[in-house]
Amino acid sequence: MSWLVQPRLVNEPFGDPGVYIDFRFGRRALLFDLGDLGPLSAREVLRVSHAFVSHAHVDHLAGFDRLLRLCLHRPDPLHLVGPPGFIERVEHKLHGYTWNLLGADSVDFRIRVEEFHGDRIERAASFRAREAFRRADLPPDRLPPGTALEDEGFRITAATLDHGTPSLAFALRETLRVNVLRGALAGLGLPVGRWLNDVKRAVRVGAPDDMPIAVPGSVPIALGELKRQALRIAPGQTVAYVTDTAFHPANVARIVELARDADQLFIETPFLEEDAALAAGKRHLTAAQAGRLGRQAGARRLIPFHFSARYGERSDVLAREAALAFAGAAEDGRG
Ligand SMILES: [Zn+2]
């Protein structure tokens, strides 16, 4: 069974933080953080529909310009989500350029920016190319607590962490994976067609088994009957992204909850445990702390990144320390 999305780091682990999440179908992608986007091709950048930004330190936001420049002439909107104050920051970035050539005939490119405060989207604004990116405040979407986006087939949850400034962590949770077994369908004498998309949607939203499903050219069939005979259903994948966070109990609890049972946990490992005092001073994790967090959350795979340049000579030590702690080796005893 294939996943809906495939995530990967944008840069090598000493480079700017960021994860590119490519959809297997539908020519679409998401970004967690907007650091250096240089390694992404123009075509990959153009697929981005949403970017979720942890905080506005320069290594997490400097890639905004490339994203803007490439998307400027596309009709599809760009959605950005960030921490408190993010709308003003995007507004300042947009107004750092001259837009006298934009007008009513320009491509109707729009940027929607939302701010996540505490556990919810609290403010929203939009900027249209046709209006030279003048800001228009909007009512925020009403989403359940902890949710930054609800979309067909997946949702994005967020947690506010403390990094001396609010820093958002994100998780993409696919809803159920539903595959149709074509042979079994034919055995039931049922046709393939668009009606199967409604069936998949019904399964994903948890519709009851006795719900009748209309089949073109046939009598209705109960959803439960289809599930038993012609569908294969599996849990969706979870991809979590945690960066730039101090190690203290409140953050630990939020990270473990956000990343619970993640199939892939991308987590910062800037410092070695021997430099824990330095990490604490900069409100960052050590590699061992990151590994233990992944273990505590029950993550299946840990992908370390955001290595401090001070270890440039010893590029594998951070990954090794994180992997050992994740596996539950020696470091565990140190608490
Ligand atoms: Zn930072």
Image: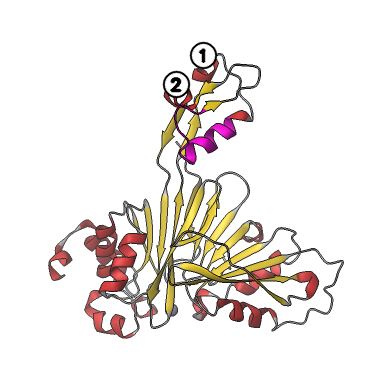
In the foreground, 192 or 7: 192
Residue 312 visible in image: yes
Q: Are marks 1 and 2 in contact (CB under 8 Å)?
A: yes
Q: Secondary structure at mark 2?
A: helix
> Magenta segment: does it hold 200?
yes
Ligand 1 found in image quarter: bottom left
| Callout 2: CB less than 8 Å from ligand 1 | no
Q: Secondary structure at mark 1?
A: helix
Mark 1 / mark 2, whichever is N-terminal: 1
State the image coordinates of residue 18 (x, y, percent, origin top left): 49, 66
Residue under pointer 2: 229
> Magenta segment: does it hold 232?
no
Q: Is residue 222 above or below residue 136?
A: above
Name the residue rendered at 73%, 67% in the picture.
72
Name the residue rendered at 52%, 55% in the picture.
21
Q: Is residue 35 above or below residue 240?
A: below
Question: Which region shows up in magenta?
Answer: 196-211
Residue 316 visible in image: no
Residue under pointer 1: 187
| Callout 1: CB less than 8 Å from ligand 1 | no
Q: Quadrant of residue 241?
A: bottom left
Name the residue rendered at 58%, 30% in the picture.
196
Split into 4 quadrants, where in the image is the N terminus?
top left
Q: Residue furthest left?
A: 333
State the image coordinates of residue 73 (x, y, percent, origin top left): 76, 64
Say whether residue 272 is left or right of residue 304: left
Say whether residue 214 is left or right of residue 301: right
Type of amino acid under label 2: Gln
Say whether residue 207 is left or right of residue 86: left
Disc 1 packing (10 Å; few <14; some 14–19; many ≥20) = few
Type of amino acid under label 1: Gly
Query: Marks 1/2: CA distance?
Result: 9 Å
